[in-house]
Image (cartoon, coloured by chain):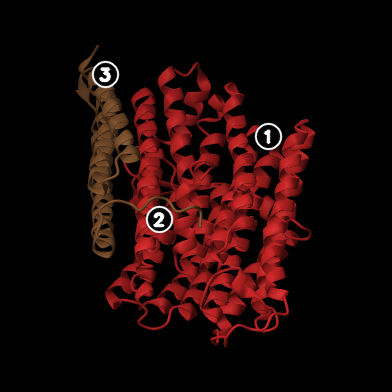
Amino acid sequence: MAWLIVLPLGWASLAFLLGPGRGAVAAIIGLAAQLWLVADLAAAVSAAGARTHAVGGWGAPLGIDLAADGLSVVMLLLMQAVALPLAVYARAYFAPGADESRYFWPMTGFLVAAANALFLSADLFNLYVALELLGLAAVGLVAAGGGAPQLAAALRYLLATLVGSGAYLLGVAALYGTYGTVSIATLTPLLAAGQAPALVWIAGGAMLAGLAVKTALFPFHFWLPPAHGGAPAPVSALLSGLVVKASFYLILRLWLGPLGELAAAAPGAGWLLALLGSAAILWGSFQAIRAAHLKMLIAYSTVAQLGYLFLIFPLLAAPSAAQAGVMHVFAHGFAKAAMFAAAGALIRATGQDTVAGLAGLAERLPLTLFAFGLAGLTLMGLPPSAGFLAKWQLIEAALAQGYWFVAVVVLAGGLLAAFYVLRVLRQAFLSAPAAGALRPVPRTLEWTAFALAAASVLLGFRGVDLLALLAAGGAP
Amino acid sequence: MTSGLIFACAGAAVFALGVAGVMLIAHLLRRVLAFNLMGSGAFLVLVGLGQRAGVPDPVPQAMVLTGIVVAVAATALALALMRRLHAATGRAELPPAGDDD
């Protein structure tokens, strides 16, 4: 289990020592090994339930415990399964010696290590450290774009993420002051046992607010579009597909664990998150429909898709709500990575990134456009994609509890997604005279984008296995 | 009111000042300093509440040490980015948020 953290740290350091722009092969081999380790861990968890590992042989009160249950394994699986094709993509995307790829490999390694540590952590303070490391690595990747807009986006992202994790840390401090422990497993029964003092309520609110900033929940989404839209394509794919999901994972983990009792006592909190999520769906989709630049369109689509994740909180009484959330995390992770990858190939070919400039590309880059369309299928939630499965379960959970307006928001969001996806495709299928010669695109770019998109659709057929893995180890 | 509680209340106030600074100040260096203030406030809460009957608890102190390391790294990253931005634009402030594009 600890290897999942040590291995990426190892290849990241190796890439750093090799020098700027090097280390791609080590990263790909490392990620493949990690994928195998996660598969192994998944088999162990589904056979024998949740696993814990005492790092260095020191047990929980003194040392640090790593724990893996169904939810962590599912997130680990997503992380490695998306990062591996993206590493192959990035290797072909960055021209040798390109300035923007100087520190891509070490940063990616630290990012993957931090995310894996986050998914495996069993105490709140360790989670804080992993969260902060993840944020710093992500900011470094955004800044690697080099230009002034990227630097400004990176700084804005950094300040937002620091305020978010600061609020989380304040919450952890208050919880430790009240209960004298930060272990999730110990805190959960303590919080459930009796009337929580006011300090604990403040702590829970601070933690949730901080994490909502980091997950770019409307209206805290201001940092996301410039950061994700301005970074190089492989970076945008990593950030949009994976990094924002890490803080969502933490919210879900807290909501199902220690803060569950508080959430049950104050149903308004869940509804507030769902309301902001609905606003995010509508606002993000609206901005995506009117965005002039392709990557901004995809970044705003991320804002909208993150909104769905928050719709589940008032519905968690039904088990299918948590399943819908995780399924949507998966579907969106693959689809958004595929979309940014396809956008990167399109930008590479045309040399510009406006939506209007895509006219007539469907004949010239059919595979990339097909990948974009497949990923769009998942975002719209059409069968048989994983996105359909997620929305189906979400609507089912909403209707079973009589909240039909949640179902309306979900359906409206799917319709709006169709608008912005078809806007791109329509432009590409215009039989316009091709403006200028296209630069050749490495085949690897097109095929990895296609593989990610196909995975997001075909995952719909394996959804049951995924949910079985989620239920293993007793998480939700 | 015990001394620990005084520390914790002061920490909360310092934290709030820091958050306000990060959000409201335009100059980047002052925003970075405000972030450090925010971190110090959280650490003060952690140490202040972590006292049991006047006896300091070592666990929050270890946490604060870890937190200081993280804060130093974040500050260094922020300062490096700020210098690059200053070299690129000649200003030590973020450009006004673009109109969504």
Q: Quadrant of residue A173?
A: top left
Task: Give the chain of mark 1.
Answer: A
Q: Which residue is mark 3?
A: B5
Judging depth in this view, the residue of A210 and B33 nearest the camera is: B33
Query: On the rendered image, what quadrant is the C terminus of chain A found in?
Result: top right
Q: Could you classify mark 1 by the number of other residues whose Cα lies within 10 Å: few (under 14), some (14-19), or many (20 or more)?
A: many
The residue located at (57%, 88%) in the rendering is: A437
Mark 3 residue element: helix
Residue at the image position 58 percent from the left and 48 percent from the top? A306
Separation of residues labelled 2 and 3 (CA atoms)? 34 Å
Q: Which residue is mark 1?
A: A315
**Amino acid type shown at disc 2:** Ala
Tell which subunit mark 3 falls on: B
Relative side of A214 to A137, left or right: right
Image x and y of residue A172, in percent: 38, 33
Q: Residue at x 53, y 24 (%)?
A: A192
- Please tell me the numbered disc located at residue A390: none
At mark 2, the secondary structure is helix
Cα separation, mark 1 vs mark 3, equals 38 Å
Chain painted red: A
- The amino acid sitting under disc 1 is Leu
| Cα gap from disc 2 to disc 1, whole angstroms | 30 Å
Question: Any idea which chain is the brown one in this picture?
Answer: B
Q: Between A220 and A327, which is closer to the camera in this rendering? A: A220
Residue at screen point 28% across, 41% down: B35
The single residue placed furthest to the top in the displayed view is B1
Residue A7 seen in the current view: no
| Quadrant of the rendering where the N terminus of chain A is positioned | bottom left
Q: Which residue is mark 2?
A: A114
